[in-house]
Amino acid sequence: MGQVGDTSMTDQGRPVFKDPVSRDNYGPVAPRAGDRMFRALVVTVIAVAIGLRLWGMGFGLPNLYHEDEWRIVARALSFGTGSLHPGSFELGTLGMYICFLLFAAYALIGLAFGQFSSIDDFAVSYFVDPTPFYLIARGLFFVCGLVSIYLVFLIGRRLRGRWAGLLAAALVAVFPVHVFRSHLAFPDTMMLCFMAGALYVMIRDREAAMNYRKDAIAGLLIGLGIAAKYTAVFMGIGYIVWRVWEGRRQDLNWLGISSRLAVGGFSCVIGLFIGMPYFFLDFQHAFPGIVGMESISKSLTSRYSAVVGVGTGSALHELSETMLSPDNIGIIALVCGAFGLMVALRRWPAFAAGLISIGALNIVWALRRDRLMVRWLFATELVLCIAAGYFVVWGYLWLRDRTSAGVAAVVSVILSASLLVIPLTHSIRATHALASPDTRTLARKWIETKLPSGTKLLIVGTRAYNPQPRPNEDSITRELSRVQEAGEGRYRGLIKYCEYELEASRRVSGPQYDIRRLKHNRAYDAAAVYDFNASLETYVESGTEYILTNSLDQREMVMRGLWEYGAKQFFQDLSAKCDAAASFAPGQGTTGPEITIWRVLANAPDAGREAWETKCRYRPCSIVALDSDVQMPGQLKALVETDHRTVEGPSGVYQREDMACLGQ
């Protein structure tokens, strides 16, 4: 046996690296005293990975604070109505179908044990309390996240030994965005799981003869990954680069390479069909839908960039900010990953070239959107985590050969700790935020405590960014009639959705409200149940008493200017004609967007002394009887026009303190 860290030749004449501190398939390496330490670190990584992902797993429930999560779970349930068609294709459907199977198992268990009396009763239970459904879905993607970590370990171990695998897996385990997306029913972790599986199949192929079985398995996993989330298509490009390079290394002719690529491509199509059958069965709507959603997303981000002054000239600046974001893996890991890819080109040229192509194409695609987010670079982060683990072990061997084993070990431990401490800190902070009280939950409690049932509410913006008080029968019936008028089509599932929600409203106790919704964007939601481009006066005249807004949607509406009426004008009217009855901002111990509950002064029953004192700087000078039909906006207008020092309000006479009326 050669010296530790040396290479020896296999029967096929290829060099095989012998890990200095592990026993694996590279060759017989003697047991080391570090085995016990390695096992302890493995247990630590597993515990940290599970702990970070379980902490805050119930985030928001029973409220639903992310649109993508709602789409996956609600559509999975809609398959129970008799059609497996997803309706739209902005998201991959593999996760939806798996969730549907899990929900079916949950329904059968519930029926067997008497929890549900019928399938309809099972469906209504979702609207009574959706918590079990979301915990099931979140559990699925939580498991996918853990499996992806294990697969990254296997990849790193194949590349440079078990310590490289452990460090790469630890990086993924504490990667903040991976931790966050593992908490919720998002397809990212499922996509990453299949991508890592395909990479592992590819790296295993280097120690075996080129065969079609490996290509078939890799292609199948890539197809399933694309069916989970479309950005896994970059994995397909990486597979092609790897297969061509590796084929030429083994002296295969172009016919042999092409035949293996054909097998991989055919298997990819099979995987895509398994996870997304209606991409083929309804191609005339699926493909334009996917391309259309991408075009809408790019158009919206381009419009945003034009407003805030971000253009293609600042693409590198945008990329650097995203890469250095606290949600990323950290600057040290980024540098080590980049160097690791360069070093790996010498020992694993085909595989490293495939990894580089995956990351490069992912970055180019993300830059087209003009506004980058870390979660759009998931494939790149996977590549960098694997390469960073490879680089640290390579650096240890390089230092050991030039100094001593002790010096190399100390430097490697310090570097490894530096790699992990930054993303771990941010992951703990993000997970703590998930477990903290949310402003939307606090606002809902205020509404249910302060406002009586039947109060007319207008919720402005995306459902997930706002408080979610329970709608009453009138508002659900109104939504149902609008969906029915829109016809079957893409709203077919929404008809049953509204019918079950209507039945649930009759079963539950507690406050229920007459809710209308106003949105700025038709791209991602069921247009039939939202109003668009409406003025504030429309809702004031219809008797709306309170209006709910959030800081996230308000910023997007004003900056993008998507309303014909004009979002800026809407919010100017809002501050002029309404009173901020309550506000909930994130701060110490709370998270979420800033929520403001506006009271429409012309309609709210308690628009009296408090509203007057809020709109103008007056102090009460006497209390006199006043006719009940006095309208505050008219009085305020008269006050501004005549410049009176005193004015009669709904509950008395008020005297101006500084002659500066805020109502102007």
Image (cartoon, rainbow, N blue to C red):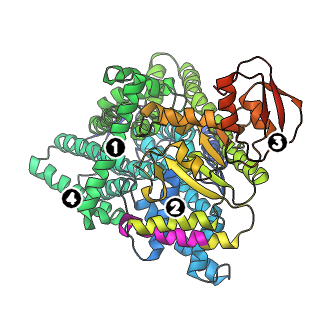
Horizontal and vertical percent for residue 586?
Answer: 68, 34
Q: CA distance from mark 1 to mark 3?
A: 55 Å
Residue found at the far right of this picture: 622
Is residue 32 or residue 37 the one in the foreground? 37
Q: Which residues are magenta?
A: 487-502
Q: Quadrant of residue 242?
A: top left
Residue on which disc 3 sits: 626
Is residue 550 or residue 356 the one in the foreground? 550
Residue on which disc 4 sits: 263
Instruction: Find out whether the residues at labels 1 and 4 contact each other: C-beta distance under 8 Å.
Output: no
Badge 3 local density, few (<14 within 10 Å), some, or many (20+)? few
Badge 1 local density, few (<14 within 10 Å), some, or many (20+)? some
User: 602 left or right of 104?
Assistant: right
Say whether residue 501 is magenta: yes
Q: CA distance from mark 2 to mark 1?
A: 23 Å
Residue on which disc 1 sits: 296
Q: CA distance from mark 1 to mark 4?
A: 34 Å
Instruction: Find out whether the residues at labels 2 and 1 contact each other: C-beta distance under 8 Å.
Output: no
Q: CA distance from mark 3 to mark 2?
A: 54 Å
Say whether residue 345 is magenta: no
Residue on which disc 2 sits: 73
Q: Amino acid at mark 3?
A: Leu
Task: Residue at 45% x, 62% y: name it.
Answer: 96
Q: Amino acid at mark 2?
A: Val
| Residue 160 visible | no
Q: CA distance from mark 3 to mark 4?
A: 85 Å
Q: Amino acid at mark 4?
A: Val
Earlier sequence position, callout 2 versus callout 1: 2
